């Protein structure tokens, strides 16, 4: 154990930034870009080295392309074929079917076992205080390129779990492989948590209670998420927070629970109430607007169920009575709930009739 400590790089914490500081994309991602570009250069691939990414959108596309190219070269050298993008999508969709994060991890592990060794091995270790997500790529040998790719794979799972839970998870520590690194800054920025280089394997340490967090995302939200997976975390912090709040409010309504207050949401996301409000304001929105959007969307879905009365819907959504719900709905749509429902049903019937006539011609 003493030798393991001497060979390990001490745990370092991410640099502090002002909550309102935006920063340039090039400033934020330059260290990680440099590492990836260096690996490409070592492999003789210089296609994109003259055009480094300058914006978030460019970085997302460049990052995904670079990782895929590095994986392809590793596959040729080590006969270790990576997962196809379609297989990654299936694994993510399978995780989306879980009820809690613990079940999502278990499903990911089962899927990886089916593709062994290409998908590596996923493990979950639990003790009295901590849950540890472990990733072993099962590569025949470790190189600087394979280590970098495996770290990005660990980050991809971290990103998936955060998206499923609809919140930033309280990561206690990231373990980024057995290789000793002097270049930990990119990974501090990537994981926004202390990282350990030179330790045992690749892992994420969370508080035990994280495993019980519910899955709040829906299949309808998946395509937008997967388009840039695993780089969605690089979006503006305020926008990401607004998406998290929307997901948590929508999940509460789907479960028939009371809508969480600003203070409850801020506390659950690890933010002070003032920081919570500031970040939403920076994203051009606020709690009241997001709450209204969530209620409006839930009302639309409920009204499309023909057997649900306006009184039942108003109670389900937490309104004092049907009259209060009707006033709110009229403010949103300019018509009463009953009139809106008739319009939608009539529109659907007309569309169905037109489709039937076309099919018969």
Image (spheres, rainbow, N blue to C red):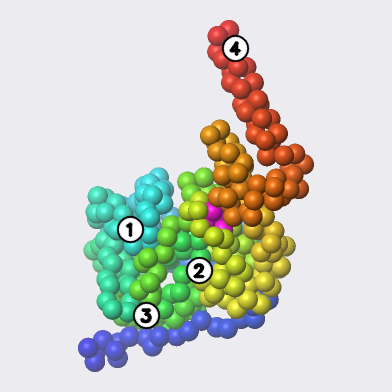
Q: Nearer the viewer, mark 1 or mark 3?
A: 1
Q: Secondary structure at mark 3?
A: loop
Q: Earlier in the sequence, mark 3 or mark 2?
A: 2
Crowding at mark 3 (Cα within 10 Å: few <14, some 14-19, many 20+):
many
Foreground residue among 337 and 285: 337
Q: Secondary structure at mark 2?
A: loop
Q: Nearer the viewer, mark 3 or mark 4?
A: 4
In what quadrant of the picture does the C terminus appear? top right
Foreground residue among 172 and 62: 172
Q: Position of residue 220 (x, y in %)?
A: 52, 45
Q: Position of residue 194 (x, y in %)?
A: 44, 81
| Residue 202 appears in the rendering | no
Which residue is depicted at the point 51% across and 65% down?
167
Q: Nearer the viewer, mark 3 or mark 2?
A: 2
Majority secondary structure in the magenta region: helix
Residue 250 falls inside the magenta stretch: yes
Report, in whole angstroms, how far the alpha carbon at label 1 lies from the one at label 3: 28 Å
Crowding at mark 2 (Cα within 10 Å: few <14, some 14-19, many 20+):
some
Q: Which residues are magenta?
A: 249-253
Q: Secondary structure at mark 1?
A: helix
Residue annotated with mark 2: 168
Q: Earlier in the sequence, mark 3 or mark 4?
A: 3
Residue annotated with mark 3: 197
In the rendered image of this protein, does residue 54 appear above or below residue 83? Answer: below
Report, in whole angstroms, how far the alpha carbon at label 4 lies from the one at label 2: 50 Å
Residue annotated with mark 1: 103
| Residue 171 appears in the rendering | yes
Q: Classify residue 117 as left or right of residue 39.
A: left
Which residue is depicted at the point 35% across and 57% down?
104
In the rendered image of this protein, does residue 338 appear above or below residue 163? Answer: above
User: Pointer 3 and pointer 4: residues touching (CB < 8 Å)?
Assistant: no
Crowding at mark 4 (Cα within 10 Å: few <14, some 14-19, many 20+):
few
């Amino acid at each position: 154990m003493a030798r393991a400590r001497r060979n390990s790089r001490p745990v370092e914490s991410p640099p502090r930034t002002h909550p309102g500081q935006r920063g340039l994309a090039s400033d934020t991602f330059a260290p990680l870009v440099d590492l990836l570009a260096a690996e490409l250069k070592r492999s003789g691939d210089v296609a994109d080295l003259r055009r480094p990414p300058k914006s978030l959108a460019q970085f997302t596309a460049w990052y995904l392309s670079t990782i895929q190219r590095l994986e392809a070269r590793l596959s040729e050298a080590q006969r270790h074929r990576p997962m196809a993008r379609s297989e990654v999508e299936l694994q993510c969709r399978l995780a989306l079917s879980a009820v809690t994060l613990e079940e999502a991890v278990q499903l990911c592990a089962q899927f990886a076992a089916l593709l062994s060794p290409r998908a590596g091995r996923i493990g979950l270790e639990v003790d009295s205080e901590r849950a540890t997500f472990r990733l072993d790529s099962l590569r025949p040998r470790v190189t600087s390129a394979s280590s970098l790719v495996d770290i990005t794979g660990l980050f991809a799972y971290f990103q998936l779990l955060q998206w499923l839970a609809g919140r930033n998870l309280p990561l206690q520590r990231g373990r980024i492989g057995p290789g000793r690194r002097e270049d930990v800054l990119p990974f501090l920025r990537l994981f926004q948590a202390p990282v350990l280089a030179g330790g045992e394997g690749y892992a994420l340490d969370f508080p035990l209670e994280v495993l019980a967090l519910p899955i709040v995302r829906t299949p309808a939200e998946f395509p937008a998420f997967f388009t840039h997976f695993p780089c969605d975390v690089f979006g503006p912090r305020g926008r990401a927070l607004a998406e998290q709040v929307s997901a948590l409010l929508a999940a509460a309504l789907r479960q028939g629970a009371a809508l969480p207050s600003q203070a409850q949401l801020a506390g659950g996301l690890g933010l002070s109430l003032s920081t919570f409000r500031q970040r939403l304001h920076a994203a051009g929105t606020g709690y009241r607007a997001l709450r209204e959007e969530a209620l409006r969307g839930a009302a639309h879905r409920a009204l499309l169920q023909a057997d649900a009365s306006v009184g039942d819907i108003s109670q389900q959504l937490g309104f004092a009575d049907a009259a209060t719900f009707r006033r709110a709905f009229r403010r949103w749509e300019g018509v009463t709930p009953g009139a809106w429902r008739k319009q939608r049903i009539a529109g659907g019937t007309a569309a169905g009739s037109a489709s039937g006539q076309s099919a018969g011609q």
